Every structure is written in structure tokens, then in C-alpha cells.
Amino acid sequence: MLTSEQLAVVNAAQTGEHLKVAAFAGAGKTFTLQAVARALQGRRILYLTFSRALANEAQEKFRGLAEAMTNHALAFHKTGKPFAEKGRLKSSLFQARRLLAEAMPELDALREWGFRDREEAMFPVLETVNRFTQSESDGVGVEHIPDVLRLEIEATGSSFDDFATCFVPIARQAWELLSAPEAPYPVSHDVYLKLYQLSRPQLPYDVILFDEAQDANPAMLGILLPQAAQRIFVGDPHQQIYAWRGAVNAMDRLEGTELALSQSFRFSEAIADEATELLQLFKGESRRVRGNPNPKRDGSIAILSRTNAGALREVLRLLEGSHKVALVNKVEELTDALEAAYRLYKGHKPRHPEFSLFRSWEHLKFLIERFPSIAAQYRPYERLVEEYTDRIPDICRTLRHSLVSEEEAEVVVSTAHRSKGREWDGVVLAEDFEGVTLAQENAAHGCVALYPEEANLTYVAFTRARNALNKGSFSAVLEYQKHLATAVRKGAKRLCTEENLKPKPPEPQPPKAEEAPQRGVRTLWKKLFGD
């Protein structure tokens, strides 16, 4: 049976207007779109989502009422198949770096900017191309250069404009080589999606249903927004956590009737209250999240971290306590980055996208202290490497051979990003959530900065819990930041402007909790659910 909010969406869809439906976590987005498809039976309907598993599941549930596919599947037959037939499709654009470096002597011009060889220079070039593939732009430009590279150049006192003048033509050439149909270079799936967007396709559908629309990148919007079809975008703008890889809130760019789904079927009223307070204070949300009085219970526990390094630390602690641990992330994603950080620490130049831009360990530490955005991503690696030092290689080998499946595990560990779409009875926030900055006082300008994407990630973590949420040592940090946000909402403190937020040395951090949370699985269970 449909709720009154879901029924309002179905009725509005029948008017033929474009719709944007803001749905809180667990509010039955896909179920609502199935009801829309039934109401619009007889029209040519396309259902789009990001996950192949969800697309396959939707194809079965829609039962011929709509054609369900992923965004990339939409482009595959026209622009992706030629790459697949030549065996060029890979999981990452960075797999092209060696072949491409050999074909681009122009990369030698980047030596004067601190890059030791062509392959090393290929990392920022390919990251720039990667950002271009996720954009709506017609060509590679200075706006696609990674922010961390801009910060590095400016931190040395060099001219970023001079660097960009040298760098952008090289990145454009790399794109031309990668996108050439007969070239041998590996490409990512985003390459053919970008080529599809640049072809300005006209889709043969009357209605487009776009699920999880908050995670669309501009390239995808460049395909969908020009279409003549009725567009119904459904998503949770507070779950937009992929801005770092090009995602934008598609809901903001769609004109049409705005509707809401505020009733969550996933979690209890207590979790709903936590989510409501978070969104109202740090995002200015006016609606309340409504919970389920009888959410599902299955005894599952997950520890969610802010970063990959934070997830590694939690796994290590649990393994040292002889617990059976499952990891939602691919273990290689975590160990490869940790080994790259260790190589940098030992004075070597790592061949890894996340660490290839740093000249030395001291250089990384300098940037961590200078720029909060870099600190949020890299400080956990800094602490992990400096704590375990030469044990890192053995630790990585142990991690690759000591994990169990989720069915066998006592506790599941995941990053908050990887937890999206998942749910557990109880969720514990990992120690590295202490580094999450939702609000920060800027003493120099007498204002408070709010960080909406960090609030989004925290909201995602909170709403993975069905019945119990243990914020651990993040509680003290969160309370301090709630105090700042409350002052802004009441007008007692001024909200910082973009000009105020230009990078400066970070302010002192708020006090941490005196006691770290206990980590044993039995202790966690007792703390979450009682005896």
C-alpha cells in the first residue's frame, strides 16, 4: 500500500510534468517509481540507476513496464562496445599510464614542475582527464586540474596559471589519444559515457525515471536534461557524497514540481531523530525524518569509518582480538593505498593515484597541516604508517588472508562511502570520525563555516543503523560542532562566506572524548542492545 506521499508522486507523474522527488534514506524510492511505471503503463519508460545489481532487480520488478539499465549501459552499445571488442575497457583510467607515457614525449615538459619522469607525470594528467569525463564540458580545461595539485603549486609560491598553460595542452592530447577508436590504450567506462554525452543523443523514451539522482555527474545530466521525455528524478540530496568524483545534486538542475518522501521504512524513530537533528543544524533542512516503529532486527553490527585508513585500523584491532571480520570494501583498495603511503614514508615515489602527487613524506605532512581538505583524506594514513612503520608490509599481507565473508563474520567493517545502500541493526562510528568537520569556527573572520558534504557523509553513516547508533569518540566532537551550528541558526554567529574559506592553516580542533570506545564485539553488542 502506498503512503500519502508516495500516492502524491504517482498522481503528479500522471500530469506529464517533470518531477523531482526528495526522498530521505529508506523512504521507498524504487518502490515508488514502480508504482509510477504502473500508472503510466503503455508509455515508453526508461528506468536508470547506478548499480548493475539494482538495474537487474528493477528489470524483474518492473515486469516489462519499463526498460531498466545503468547509466553506462545506456551508452555502451553506441560508444562503449568498440572499446570492449578491442579489450580496452578496464576498471581504471590509470591502467593506461605506462603505454600513454611512452607515446607522449610532451610529458617531459613537466619535469621543471617537479615530476621526475613521464610515468609520474601521467598521474595528474590522467586524473585531469578523468575529471573531464565526469563533466559536461566539451573539452579538457584548467577547471579539471585536481585541487590538490593547485594547492601544491601555490604552496611552493609558483604561479598556477603558468603551470596550467603548460599542463592543459598535455591533458588534452592524452584525451585525444585515449578516445581514439583504433588506439591501444586502456580506458575506463567513464570514457565511453563521456563520448556518448558529446554525441548529443536523442533517447527513444516518453518517460525517464532516474533513481538515486543525487549522485549524477554533469556528464550524465548532459545526456538526460536535453531530452524531450518527461523526467522524474528521485533522490536524497543529503546522500550526495561523491562530489569528489564529479557528482552534483541533479535535483537542483531540474525544473519541475517538487515532492517529498519523508517516511523511512528502514530505521527506528530514535535514528530518525538523530538524522533530523543533523540535517536541520548542518544543512538547514526544514522537514523531519520519520522513522519506523518496528524496523527489521537481525543482530548485525557494522563499524563504519570516514576513510580507507580508518577502516584498516578497525580491522586490525578486531583481528588482534581474534574476531571474525568482514570488509565491505575490496581489501586491495585499502592495502594498495597503505603500501603506497609506506613507500612515500620510506623515501620512495609511489606509483599510486592517491600518493603520486606528493614529493616526499615531509611534503605530505606539510600539506596536511596547511589544508584541512588534505588532512581529512590523508591524516589517517599518516598516523597509521607512523604507528606501524616497518610492520606495514606484513600487516597488508595479513589483511589479504585473514578476512571472512559477511555471512561468517561477527562484525562488518566498511567505509561510510561503501556502506551506502546497506543497513545493519547496530552501527558504530570508527575512531577516524573524530576528524569529520561539520562546523568550524573561523576566528580570523569571526564566522562559522558549515561543510555540507561532510554532513551528508555523516547522515549516510547514521542512517545505515536500523535500531542503534554508537557514535563513540565522535560524540564529543559532534556536540561541540552542534553548538557552533546552533549559534549560526539562531543568528548568534555569522556564517562564513566563500571568501572567508580560502585555504588557511587549520584552526585548533575541538576537544576529544576522554575515553575511546571499547572495541570488543560482545561489548559493542551489550552497549548497543543491552543484555
Image (tube, helix red, strand yellow):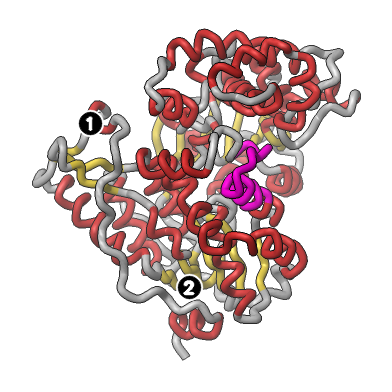
Image mark for residue 294: 2
The correct choice, above or below, for 169 with respect to 391 in the image is: above
Residue 94, picture quadrant = top right
| Number of residues whose C-alpha sits closer than 10 Å to that of mark 2, classed few (under 14), some (14–19) or many (20 or more) | few
Q: Is residue 7 visible?
A: no
Q: Residues within 10 Å of mark 1 (few under 14, many from 20)?
A: some
Residue 523 left/right relative to 118: left
Considering depth in this image, is 75 or 509 the residue closer to the camera? 509
Left or right of residue 19, residue 230 in this image: right
- The image shows residue 130 at horizontal and vertical percentages of 62, 26
Magenta residues (range): 336-354
Residue 41 magenta: no
Judged from the image, the secondary structure of the residue bearing numbered disc 1 is: helix
What amino acid is at disc 2? Asn
Label 2 or label 1, whichever comes before in sequence order:
2
Which residue is identified by label 1? Answer: 500
